[in-house]
Image: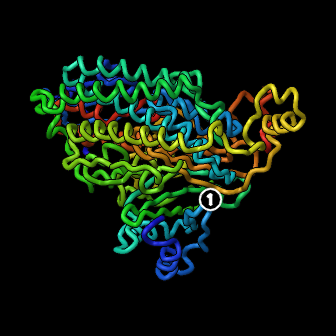
Amino acid sequence: MGKISNQQVIQSLTLKFGDRISVPNEPFGLLTFETSVDHISEVLRSLKEDKELKFNYLTDITGIHFPEQELSMGVIYHLHSLSNNVRVRIKVFLDIKAPHIPTATSLWEGANWMERETFDFFGIIFDGHPNLLRILNVDDMTVFPMRREHPLEDPNRVDKKDYFFGR
Amino acid sequence: MTNHPVFTDNDPQKETITLNLGPTHPATHGVFQNVLEMDGERIVSGVSTIGYIHRAFEKIAEHRPFYQITPLTDRMNYCSSPINNMGWHMTVEKLLGIETPKRVDYLRVIVMELARISDHLICNGILGVDTGAFTGFLYLMEEREHIYEIYEEICGARLTTNIGRIGGFERDFNDIAFAKIKNFLIKFPPILKEFEVLFNRNRIFIERTSGVAPVDPETALNYSWSGPILRATGVDYDVRVNEPYSSYQDFDFEIPVGTSGDVYDRYIVRNEEMWQSLRIIEQALQKIEKEPKGIFHANVPEFYLPPKEEVYNNMEALIYHFKIVMGEIETPKTEVYHAVEGGNGELGFYLVNDGGRSPYRLHFRRPSFINYQMYAPMSAGMLLSDAIINMSSLNVIAGELDA
């Protein structure tokens, strides 16, 4: 579909970052790789500013929580190279005790609310964010509601237990 | 982001007036609050407060089976809910590897383009109201009613449609539905033409909208804008063309782009998109004629609920019905991102699946949420009356903003 293939993107990425990024895989044709919190700023910046790849469009930032993993909080970036018509997904996993990650607002103004939303629901702290406040939930909320430990329903209800939903 | 000076009211330095625009202001068409610092008629700075109708759809979705998430997507952009529904079905189909027949794709295209027309109709109609021309709005609302009647014929609902199922539609379009669509294609163009005659070259409308809130393509991309407002700045990004879904590659249509990205350009782009949508619907009707009749869903008994009478009379249907409802069907453990071109831009579904009955994590990339964050910064220096029409031309839908 795109003007450059995923193989070319992988080649260019491994040339630049070597072992600082994980081995990419391609679920449903969308190039996905992991990197560490130390390298995420550099990876995002060079993807955006690369003359050939031109991942200049930030589609989305969101979070995820895997309680059983050692690094349980995830931040997921979706970037899009509009001129090459190819997407890439970058994941960073953080320790829940200190979920700090550098902000992307210096690269994209649009990251501002996406990061605020991720902070609001997952408690991930984006260092350097100009205005990291809650956005959709009430200001005096004390928990981060999208973390897995928070139940959706009244815990006394017996008809909404997780094992009724396949897990 | 611009500095937002905060002075208490009795501070001698305070030379501005703090104005709460919203949350329930008749000119904002939804629950939007903007705390503005005003110097006379001019906005010095502003802060948007959002989340008034946040309903935690992402959290709810983690506890619902796939087919029960469709009604949640209805309630995001409720001006074009069929697009949201179809986007969600296609995400799940991508996850499960379901290939839909061509006829289903074309039926979906018809519904999605009708939804796009109704979305743009209300945006441009309201833009007229905000600039002081009520007539156009009234002309167009009658046509939106006709689109809702088509939905009603297809799925029984009008606004929050819950249209279609995973794999296709719950039932075939009946003859009345096709007759209504054909009737709409005859009746609507003259009215849209009349609307354009009222507005496009109207001196008052042009003076009121042209040059208001212009945005250059770099800024728009930097703020991750998408949809008609991005195309009004001159960037030709449309998901229907970049990553064709539901057989959009079979259709011949154009992507209108603007030049200056101001309110007038956004209006023109939306109007032109309605004409293109009509073209697509006409082509889809012709293509459906050539497809075998009576196919309205893919053959995926593991995920497509069988008709009720078969459940009672047919053993296999009963088993599949039980398995679907009790969630005993294996799904792949993977992640998928699927985007459709919604009324306001790229509507994305990021679905992480752990093989269970419900998503492990579902994130909606909501265009209104991402488009709206530029509103307060871009309002600085603007007249209040211009900021109002700027908001209506962004077509921010509160349900999609807050999810």
Give the residue type at disc 1.
Asp
- Residue B251 to residue B176: above or below: below
Whether residue B233 is visible, yes or no, is yes
Residue at 82% in and 29% down? B310
- Residue A132 to residue B207: above or below: below
Residue at 53% in and 76% down? A7
- Where does the image place residue A128, in percent across and percent down from the top left? 40, 56
Q: Nearer the viewer, residue A78 or B186?
A: B186
Left or right of B211, for residue B125:
right
Residue B12 in which image quadrant: top left
Q: Residue furthest right?
A: B315
- Residue B46 to residue A110: above or below: above
Residue at 36% in and 39% down? B372
Whether residue B5 is visible, yes or no, is no
Q: Residues within 10 Å of mark 1 (few under 14, many from 20)?
A: some
Q: Nearer the viewer, residue B23 or B135?
A: B135
Left or right of B187, for residue B182:
right
Circle 1 — which element? loop
Residue that badge 1 annotates: A95
- Where does the image place residue B309, in percent across and percent down from the top left? 81, 25
Left or right of B263, for residue A167:
right
